[in-house]
Image (spheres, rainbow, N blue to C red):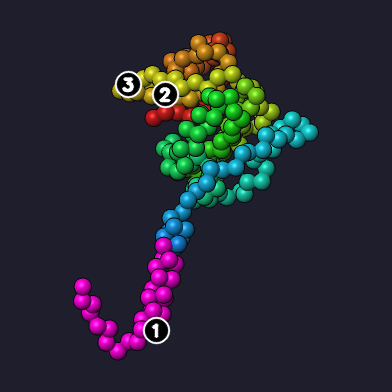
Amino acid sequence: MNQMPCIGVDERGLMMKKGASIVVCLACFLVLLTGSVTVVQQSSPLDFSFDNMDQYTGFNSLPSRYTLEMAQNAGYYVMNDSEVVANGSLWDGFLAASSQGKTASLRMAKFYSEHEGNPFFTDLFYKEGYYYLFDSSAKDLSGKPFKHLLTLKGQFGNPLRDSGVIVLANDRSLTFDLIMSGMLSSNSEYIKSIPEYQLIMFLI
């Protein structure tokens, strides 16, 4: 096959240019791998620690102002106005690990339009056969063990639409209708009759 002549460039210069081109291509490739795509690693295991008053200390180091981007880059499960917007696969990872009896933890950052820059954090643990949930807005952070993580579905609203909740509970007889009726009831005796649970999130 005849080659096109290289006019005005000696062989040594051509080799140098080819070498430079290869270096540039490699550099561009590395930039594509590491620079233009942000890969968020799963957040490191949370520290299941308590102070001398038996209060969970996991939220102590969080800054007073926190943005959605900060939560995303930290590897948290991020929700904005009840919609999952970042790192949704972390939830599946937590479920998979806990269902196999493995120690697992997950931090959820929940942002709401009316509380811009001040999200609510939920730390969820599975440890030695029990689930624990801690809410950054709660006064009591002592933590209560629950045996089950339940996804309960039903219909709610006007008009009725498919809805659901994810909760921690010790009683598998708990239902979606029981939870919703308890939330709407003003009867304290009826509310007390509902098996104890902790709400993780609504399914909309």
Report the residue at 69% width, 38% height from top: 57
Element assignment for label 3: loop
Magenta span covers which residues?
1-29
Q: Residue furthest bottom?
A: 8
Residue for badge 3: 160
Three-letter amino acid code of the residue under disc 2: Gly
- Say if mark 2 contacts mark 1, CB within 8 Å: no
Report the residue at 24% width, 83% height from top: 5
Residue for badge 2: 164
Q: Which mark is residue 12?
A: 1
Q: Is residue 104 above or below residue 66?
A: above
Three-letter amino acid code of the residue under disc 1: Arg
Alpha carbon separation for disc pair 3 and 2:
12 Å
x and y, in percent, of residue 42 in the image: 53, 43
Q: Residues within 10 Å of mark 1 (few under 14, many from 20)?
A: few
Q: Is residue 36 above or below residue 88?
A: below
x and y, in percent, of residue 189 in the image: 56, 10
Please tell me whether residue 26 belongs to the stretch shown in magenta. Answer: yes
Report the residue at 52% width, 46% height from top: 41
Q: Residues within 10 Å of mark 2 (few under 14, many from 20)?
A: many
Which of pointers 1 and 3 indicates the residue nearer the eye? 1
The tag earlier along the polypeptide, 1 or 3, is 1
Which of pointers 3 and 2 indicates the residue nearer the eye? 2
Report the residue at 27% width, 83% height from top: 6
Element assignment for label 2: strand
The tag earlier along the polypeptide, 2 or 1, is 1
Q: Is residue 112 visible?
A: no
Give the quarter of the image for residue 193. top right
Alpha carbon separation for disc pair 2 and 1:
71 Å
x and y, in percent, of residue 45 in the image: 61, 39
Quarter of the C terminus within the rendering: top left
Q: For this view, does 37 lie left or right of residue 139?
A: left
